[in-house]
Amino acid sequence: MSTTFADLHISAPLVNILRERNMEKPTPVQVEAIPLILEGRDALVESPTGTGKTFAYLLPLLSKVNMDKKDVQAIVLAPTHELVMQIAREAERLLPSIENVVVPIIGGVDVKRQVERLKKKPVLVVATPGRLLELIDQRKLKVHEVKTVVVDEADRMLDAGFGKPVAEVMKRTLRDTQRLLFSATLPEGVVEAAEVFTKDAAVIRAAAPEGAAGVAHMYLVSDPRKKVDNLRRLLRLVDVRSSIVFVN
């Protein structure tokens, strides 16, 4: 008998939202990670790209938060503006009837507008670590009620560029705060680095869903003036049903 989201003890409103989106069966990483997260365990989770890692942490986080308690109760850290906004949008889609419950925090934008949004008392903040740390140090964001911190793309977030601000954010939260690290790859160096701020962390190395297509990585060198034309040609060539194009 296959596992359902209801079997994983996800809250009923979230299960209904998933059902409306024709999502009934969780992926392997969701089956393995969600129960541990609901238990409050720290965890290091590896799963290939496109296997549902975002929902593997958003669903238990949003099942656990107290919507009546107007404090930031969970933080998700991500390395790029685009990923922060993507995660925040997915969280908002899981809570369509509740406004101002999720706030994205990124650098390079008006900090005053972000402070104003924080005054509306979100329960979940999704952020790049540098700007988040800045707001914590300015006492614009209180983290004493934060129960869980998620580090997405942990293999990037614990490298030389992001490692220090991530560690500083961890120091600002309480010692018993749940720490979760998610990544497509978890090299031993990342596992060792995470030992500094995790406690008895479970290590999950989940497989791709049965029958899922593999992920091939490749790049095409293009004259900047021909990028758009080359992109059109590439999309016609591979004949995909849907695509995401990231534009800087």
Image: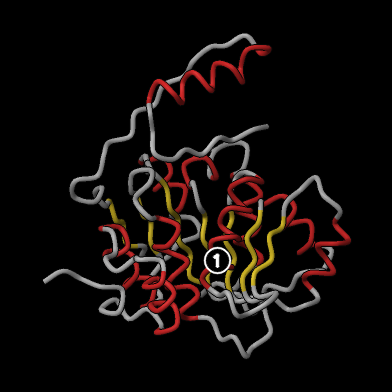
Q: Is residue 232 above or below residue 180?
A: above
In the image, 132: left or right of 188?
A: right
Instruction: Name the residue at the bottom extreme.
Output: 68
Residue type indicated by callout 1: Ala
Seen as rendered, the residue at the extreme left is: 1
Q: Is residue 106 left or right of residue 9?
A: right
Q: In this image, 172 relative to 210: left or right?
A: right
Secondary-structure class at tag 1:
helix
Identify the image quadrant of residue 169.
Answer: bottom right
- Residue at the image point whose x is 53% and y is 22% from the top: 232
In the rendered view of the protein, which quadrant contains the N terminus? bottom left
Image quadrant for the C terminus? top right
Q: Quadrant of residue 198?
A: bottom left
Q: Give the image location of residue 68, x and y in percent.
A: 62, 90
Whole-percent x and y of residue 243?
47, 38
Q: Nearer the viewer, residue 143 or 124?
A: 124
* The image quarter in which residue 236 lies: top left
Q: Residue at x 66, y 46 (%)?
A: 81
Report the number of discs. Answer: 1
- In the rendered view, would you say 59 is above or below 78? below
Q: Is residue 25 left or right of residue 245?
A: left
Q: Position of residue 115 (x, y in %)?
A: 83, 66
The structure residue drawn at horizontal position 38% and vertical position 33%, both measured from the top left corner, is: 240
Q: Residue at x 43, y 55 (%)?
A: 195
> What kind of colouring is applied to the model shown?
secondary structure
Mark 1 highlights which residue? 91
Mark 1 burial class by Cα count in 10 Å: few <14, some 14-19, many 20+: many
Residue 188 place in picture, x, y as percent: 36, 41
